[in-house]
Image (cartoon, helix red, strand yellow):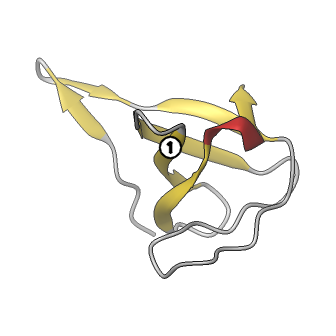
Amino acid sequence: MIFYIRVVNNFIQHIEYRVLYPYEPRQGDELELEENDIVFVVEKCEDGWFIGTSLKSGQFGTFPGNYVVKH
């Protein structure tokens, strides 16, 4: 399983978030979310979407930022 993380000033940076609501992807680059799963967020986009990796599935993609909360 590969996790995508960001390296900032030689430090690995990922922030854990817990999924509040399930989300079914509508596009190929989106990440499926299941309630209470943990995702590692590596980027927050200006449009409110996040980019990250699911701890459970190892999949990488985008998802709505308002579906998760810091863990």
Left or right: residue 51 versus residue 32 is left
- x, y percent for residue 65: 62, 39
Count numbered badges in the picture.
1
In the figure, residue 16 lies in which quadrant? top right
**Circle 1 residue:** 50
Outermost residue to the bottom: 28
Residue 31 lies, with reference to residue 44, above or below; the image says below
Task: Reply above or below: 25 against 46.
Answer: below
- Would residue 66 be found to the left or right of residue 3 on screen? right
Tell me residue 62's x, y (percent).
Answer: 49, 57
x, y (%) of residue 58? 53, 66
Viewer-closest of 44 and 38: 44
Q: Residue at 54% x, 37% y: name it.
A: 48
Where in the figure is residue 14, as x and y percent of width and height?
A: 42, 32
Residue that protrudes farthest toward the top in the picture? 9
Q: What type is the residue that disc 1 sits on?
A: Phe
